């Protein structure tokens, strides 16, 4: 507990930094919010009026103080593109991104970890080469390309996948929000039809993300397994006559997990912010596409809100991973 | 349960639920609702569903148009392409049952059976409150009202519960048409006042999220950036009951997917695909495609006439001779636009607008003109465009750049982000650029007041100043107000001729509004606002 508290304390300065930097960065962006939202037929007076209403005519320090005071009250400001409070937007969109990213990561993990172990155990074999090919192909295909290709084949040509219309087909209504994850919420409320609909919408984007994130996980598993398999205790275990299954899964893999978990954490946080393109392609109402749209229209509040949320998420994620280290490898706990 | 067993059973369960998830299987109730529901897909959605709001975007206008009523609206006629097209000159009542235009005022009698969505009757008080709101809130709505000389709350008078009079500030033929645009919509004043605050006396925060109108549809659910769901108002008094019960408008950012959705038959309508897709869909013939030229809209190349070298008429003429008009039509627009160039040399000017000018691409002549202007070796300049419409603007500018290089003019292309474009235009410092202007009110003098008049509005992007031009535009406006057809005709032809002689901006084409629909969807109507009118659409 004390350790967590200490860790959290070190986070505060970085959060303050993030707040200041995003505020300044959004102000130096090219583009004029007021004239964009004044509409196609605005006179200079109309633009001035809107600038005033938005409080953009005040000096920067004053705008900043206001922003911080609002933040302290839990007010992230309003998005001009969607017209909604940013906090509300993020609250509805973050679960969408998280559900997709987690699904992609889990699928990638289920494939990549066994693949990596096999590749390490049977080094130089057919499966090792297969692992290398899959990994190389995965990283070298840009996600939007994989996404469009999957849509073209499985939706447009074959008609197996549902229309790429976001989280649910238009004729289903979303399950009541409990966690914000449609799969979980629909199961909790016993709405199997919605569960099935949500799942079928998830398949293609999940596959797209999984293909992309396979590579780092598989490569990292293979590398770390290789080094562990070459170590003394594995040789001892083998010499002791343990079955190779026990040696690999119980002794070697557990020790190889540390770098794999680190990679997983990195891939997850990276995917969460970077799946903008997947969200665009699949009309997925996530936070990535939200932030990009806000950037295009020089809409400050959502950009600031997005960066801040991501910063907090990264911090929590790193904290979680650090805790996990302790569980996997008690030595880390002692040293920490 | 052991971890491994759990994994096994979980994968088995997942596999089991994946296989029967084929989306084509609908329960009968779902099939029924699919038949009664219209699915629209487009790139972006509203940020506010009240057109009186601060910074309401164009998709928001579509919601306002379908969920609110105006006193009057336009009749339909058949357009050039055979599809229904709004009739600029003929009005029909919507909330009013009768309109009586006097010399200095117009009186409306309201329909007695008209009610708002919450059941309260529509009264003259609501009409006055709504019009007061439109001229008071500032920004775009107030600006649009002003265009029809509707400026002060005193102009709107409640005569009795069901009669409203609008007094004219001055004689202006745009006053009545301006009452039929989207802005003067009638809002449920009691409902909105209940939700207003001291800081927000017009209840803009409430109507931003909620429809408070009497229109044919109401917004049942709006998820910003994702979808808008409309339900039909079965008690609509503004016209015949619409055929479509439910409209779902989904935002699909990728144009390729919108096209795929249409081609697979999953979406019913889409209207913002790239020109290339429309051209191809047209050839395939699986969908019905309706293309209509923007009313009163032109894409043009503009030049800043205040600064050299474009202050020189000969330079402007040289540019007009050097532009690759036909190439732009073929390679950028894929034929989906109406040419605004190459009128026959002996064609007489008409009082219609837009009308083509007489220039065609003639590089030899352009070179000669440039030499006469004192730039035999050309010059260097920048060519700017709005990245928000890069699909058309970028190839257009590249072709223009190539063409101008042939007469020695070296251009650097300057891509301006959408959010910054209007600021740049307002500065009036761009030397050479492409842009589109289109006006809701389809009158030549309306276009010219904004684009060529010396009052120098933001749309006079060239900073063009000419006393003669101003006199002709004002002459036409005043003649229209008193219905002096002869003077009007003379002045309109006069200002068109002058605009094409001075050539501060060079029209390229009139863009098309392209709408792609399934074959079983009919009833699409072209409106001046270029958005969809759900009320006339029929499915099946």
Image (tube, rainbow, N blue to C red):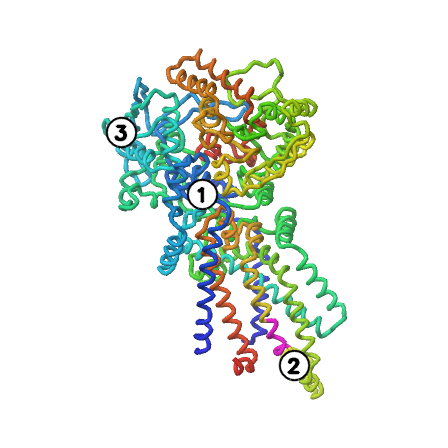
Front in this rendered view, residue B500 or B106: B500
Image mark for residue B46: 1
Quarter location, residue B60? top left
Q: Are marks 3 and 2 in contact (CB under 8 Å)?
A: no
Question: Looking at the picture, do discs 2 and 1 lie on one chain?
Answer: no
Quarter location, residue B234? top left
Tell me residue A211's x, y (percent).
64, 59
User: What segment is highlighted magenta in the picture?
Assistant: A253-260
Front in this rendered view, residue B47 or B64: B47
For this orientation, the residue located farthest to the front is: B374
Q: Secondary structure at mark 1?
A: loop
For this orientation, the residue located farthest to the top is: B486
* In magenta stretch: residue A255: yes
Marks 3 and 2, Cα distance to the nearest angstrom? 89 Å
Q: In the image, is B302 to the left or to the right of B484?
A: right
Q: In the figure, B413 relative to A150: above or below?
A: above
Q: Earlier in the sequence, mark 3 or mark 1?
A: 1
Question: Looking at the picture, do discs 3 and 2 lie on one chain?
Answer: no
Image mark for residue A246: 2
Total residue callouts: 3
> Could you tell me which chain the residue with mark 1 belongs to?
B
Q: In the figure, A9 relative to A99: above or below?
A: below
Marks 3 and 1, Cα distance to the nearest angstrom? 32 Å
Residue under the image location 45 percent in, 64 percent down: A15
Image mark for residue B199: none
- Determine the main secondary structure of the stretch shown in magenta: helix
Tell me residue B109's x, y (percent).
29, 25
Tell me residue B162's x, y (percent).
26, 28
The residue labelled by disc 3 is B154
Q: Are marks 3 and 1 in contact (CB under 8 Å)?
A: no
């Amino acid at each position: 507990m004390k350790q967590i508290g200490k860790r959290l304390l070190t986070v505060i300065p970085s959060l303050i930094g993030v707040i200041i930097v995003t505020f300044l960065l959004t102000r130096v962006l090219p583009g004029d919010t007021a004239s964009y939202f004044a509409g196609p037929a605005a006179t200079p007076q109309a633009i001035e009026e809107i600038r005033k209403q938005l409080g953009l005519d005040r000096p920067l320090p004053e705008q900043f103080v206001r922003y911080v005071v609002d933040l302290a009250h839990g007010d992230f400001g309003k998005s001009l593109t969607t017209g909604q409070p940013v906090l509300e937007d993020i609250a509805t969109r973050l679960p969408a991104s998280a559900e997709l990213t987690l699904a992609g990561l889990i699928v990638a993990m289920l494939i990549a970890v066994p693949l990596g172990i096999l590749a390490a155990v049977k080094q130089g074999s057919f499966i090792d080469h297969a692992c290398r090919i899959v990994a190389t192909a995965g990283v070298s295909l840009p996600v939007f390309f994989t996404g469009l290709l999957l849509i073209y084949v499985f939706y447009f040509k074959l008609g197996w996948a549902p229309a790429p219309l976001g989280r649910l087909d238009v004729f289903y209504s979303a399950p009541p929000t409990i966690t914000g994850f449609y799969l979980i919420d629909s199961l909790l409320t016993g709405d199997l039809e919605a569960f099935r609909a949500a799942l079928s919408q998830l398949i293609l984007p999940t596959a797209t993300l999984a293909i992309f994130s396979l590579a780092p996980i598989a490569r990292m598993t293979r590398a770390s397994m290789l080094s562990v398999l070459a170590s003394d205790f594995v040789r001892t275990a083998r010499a002791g006559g343990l079955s190779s299954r026990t040696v690999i899964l119980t002794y070697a893999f557990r020790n190889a997990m540390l770098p794999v978990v680190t990679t997983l954490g990195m891939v997850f946080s990276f995917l969460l912010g970077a799946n903008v393109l997947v969200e665009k392609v699949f009309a997925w109402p996530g936070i990535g596409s939200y932030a990009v749209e806000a950037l295009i229209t020089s809409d400050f509040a959502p950009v600031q809100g997005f960066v801040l949320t991501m910063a907090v998420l990264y911090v929590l994620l790193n904290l979680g991973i650090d805790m996990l280290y302790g569980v996997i490898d008690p030595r880390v706990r002692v040293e920490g | 349960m052991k971890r491994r067993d759990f994994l096994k059973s979980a994968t088995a369960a997942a596999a089991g639920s994946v296989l029967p998830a084929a989306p084509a299987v609908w329960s009968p109730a779902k099939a029924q609702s699919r038949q009664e529901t219209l699915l629209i897909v487009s790139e972006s959605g509203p940020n506010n569903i009240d057109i009186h709001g601060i910074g309401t975007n164009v998709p928001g206008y579509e919601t306002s148009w379908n969920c609110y009523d105006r006193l009057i609206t336009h009749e339909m006629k058949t357009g050039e392409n055979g599809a229904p097209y709004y009739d600029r000159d003929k009005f029909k009542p919507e909330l009013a049952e009768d309109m009586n235009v006097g010399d200095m005022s117009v009186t409306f009698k309201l329909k007695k059976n008209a009610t708002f969505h919450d059941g309260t009757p529509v009264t003259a008080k609501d009409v006055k409150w709504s019009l007061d709101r439109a001229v008071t809130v500032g920004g775009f709505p107030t600006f649009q009202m002003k265009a029809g000389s509707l400026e002060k709350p005193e102009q709107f008078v409640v005569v009795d519960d069901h009669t409203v009079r609008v007094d004219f500030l001055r004689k202006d033929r745009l006053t009545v048409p301006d009452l039929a645009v989207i802005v003067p919509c009638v809002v449920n004043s009691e409902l909105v006042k209940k939700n207003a605050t001291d800081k927000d006396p017009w209840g803009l925060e409430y109507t931003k999220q909620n429809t408070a109108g009497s229109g044919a549809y109401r917004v049942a659910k709006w998820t910003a950036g994702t979808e808008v769901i409309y339900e039909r108002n079965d008690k609509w008094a503004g016209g015949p009951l619409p055929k479509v019960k439910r409209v779902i408008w989904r935002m699909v950012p990728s144009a390729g997917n919108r096209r795929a959705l249409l081609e697979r038959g999953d979406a019913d309508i889409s209207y913002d695909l790239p020109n290339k897709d429309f051209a191809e869909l047209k050839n395939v013939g699986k969908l019905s495609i309706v293309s209509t030229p923007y009313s009163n809209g032109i894409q043009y190349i503009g030049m800043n006439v205040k600064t050299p070298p474009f202050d020189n008429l000969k330079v402007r003429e040289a540019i007009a001779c050097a532009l690759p008009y036909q190439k732009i039509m073929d390679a950028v627009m894929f034929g989906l636009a109406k040419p605004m160039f190459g009128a026959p040399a002996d064609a007489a000017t008409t009082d219609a607008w837009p009308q083509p000018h007489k220039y065609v691409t003639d590089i030899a002549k352009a070179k000669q003109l440039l030499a006469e202007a004192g730039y035999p070796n050309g010059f260097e300049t920048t060519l700017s465009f709005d990245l928000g419409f890069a699909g058309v603007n970028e190839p257009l500018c590249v072709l223009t750049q190539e063409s101008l290089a042939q007469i020695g003019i070296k251009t650097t292309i300057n891509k301006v982000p959408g959010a910054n474009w209007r600021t740049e235009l307002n500065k009036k410092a761009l030397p050479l650029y492409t842009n589109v202007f289109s006006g809701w009110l389809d009158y030549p003098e309306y276009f010219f007041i904004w684009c060529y008049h010396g009052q120098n509005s933001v749309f006079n992007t060239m900073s063009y100043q000419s006393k003669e031009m101003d006199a002709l535009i004002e002459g036409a406006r005043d003649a229209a107000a008193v219905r002096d057809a002869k003077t009007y005709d003379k002045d309109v032809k006069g200002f068109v001729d002058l605009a094409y002689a001075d050539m501060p901006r060079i029209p390229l084409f009139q863009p098309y509004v392209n709408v792609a629909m399934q074959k079983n969807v009919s009833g699409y109507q072209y409106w001046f606002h270029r958005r969809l009118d759900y009320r006339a659409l029929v499915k099946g």
